[in-house]
Amino acid sequence: MIKVEHLSKTFGELTVLKDISTEIKKGEVVSIIGPSGTGKSTFLRCLNLLEEPTNGSIHIDGVNVLENRADIPKLRQRMNMVFQSFNLFSHLSVLENLTLGPIKLRAMNPKEAASRSMELLRLVGLAEKANNYPDELSGGQKQRVAIARCLAMEPEIILFDEPTSALDPTMVSEVLSVIRRLAREGMTMAIVTHEMDFARDVSSRVFYMDEGGIYEEGPPQQIFENPLRPRTKAFIHRIRSYTTRVQSPDYDLYGINAEVEGFCEKQMFPASLRQNILLFVEELLTLYRPHLTAAQLDLTVAFSEKSDRLQLVCETQPALPNPLENEDGDLGAMILRNMSERVTYLRDAGKSTLELTLRPPTDQ
Ligand code: ADP
Ligand code: MG
């Protein structure tokens, strides 16, 4: 459906995309992930010519869109885009936001446009807001309107540029649900996203962008569980783990807790697991605390795909004794031992490593 060959884009001296060649087929859902600044937005914007590619060609159903400038408005209808910032017209009602395009650009009669738009609003769960104005809606509702407005143009492919990044965490899932539904219905989509669990279960293919191009692409299992190339590996590990360094007994427990909670939320860990992790981190830090006047501790919370378990790793410099092996019947140490499925402790000259594998919380 879309065939990109040798696409490159520079802004002045800055080369953002170099020599990208790829294809997206009808019915595919492609997630585009990667560190920020690697050209994900630029790539999408080049596809529907919101940015002018510096080089290369883009074919849609065999037609070279760079040679058919007159058709750009039509191209943008066929390949419509949903932005992070919604871009709704604030002076128009929700319904008018939807009908505007079909009436103006597709010469649809207003009655038909309105009835079709109402159907789309029903699809995204917002029919009752048809006569409201965008300012009266929550962020999640606005984004659902933006998706319905995009659908009103009957696109063949939808490009999403971080559709949930501007939303409160509580509103992310209502928008992702709508996109999931479109995926089920067979809509062709390219989605730039930081929501990794979503990307994993919605996509047929994942592009990892880095070094000016599609650094690695493959099915979600490959990219998320078994990436082949070094930068992909490093990225996936980084987003699936949380690390903090503690170097004094006066560490900021509340700050650390908040960060750990944020990490758990991003990973969509269930509440029971989240509670266990917080308890774990707090007890561990308490055990290490007396030593922290003279040692530094790197604490990592990471999900291990291999064992399907959560692991906590404490690395100290210099080496410290295993705090779980104190025999004074310390309650904290006992709790941690009970909650761990496996404990390994390694010590050498300059450092010690304690690795705890969490017992999965029992479902109640
Ligand atoms: P991503 O979406 O992956 O975070 P972007 O595509 O937004 O990355 O940006 C890639 C690089 O291109 C960044 O260094 C950004 O500053 C630069 N860039 C993007 N748009 C422009 C522009 N219109 N003019 C100059 N530089 C730009
Ligand atoms: Mg971007």
Image: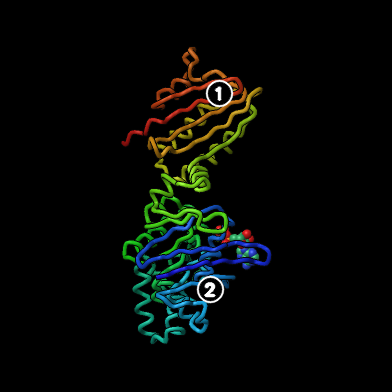
Closer to the camera in the image, 108 or 319 = 319
Q: Counting residues from the N terminus, which is met first, the one under dot 2 or under dot 1?
A: 2
Q: Secondary structure at mark 2?
A: loop
Q: Quadrant of residue 307?
A: top left
Where does residue 316 sit, x and y in percent of width and height? 58, 26
Is 2 placed above or below 315 here? Answer: below
Image quarter where the C terminus lies is top left
Neighbour tally class for label 2: few under 14, some 14-19, many 20 plus, Cα within 10 Å:
some
The dot on residue 352 is 1
Residue farthest toward the right in the current orientation of the protein? 13
The dot on residue 49 is 2
Question: For the point 49% across and 44% down, which residue is it?
Answer: 233
Count of picture labels: 2
Where does residue 123 sit, x and y in percent of width and height? 34, 68
Q: Is residue 262 visible?
A: no
Residue at mark 2 to residue at mark 1: CA–CA distance = 54 Å
Say what amino acid the circle numbered 1 marks.
Ser
Is 355 placed above or below 46 here? Answer: above
Question: For the point 55% across and 72% down, which residue is it?
Answer: 50
Neighbour tally class for label 1: few under 14, some 14-19, many 20 plus, Cα within 10 Å:
many
The dot on residue 207 is none
Q: Quadrant of residue 8?
A: bottom right
Where does residue 174 sit, x and y in percent of width and height? 41, 58
Question: For the point 41% across and 37% down, which residue is it?
Answer: 273
Q: Is residue 20 visible?
A: yes
Q: Quadrant of ligand 1?
A: bottom right
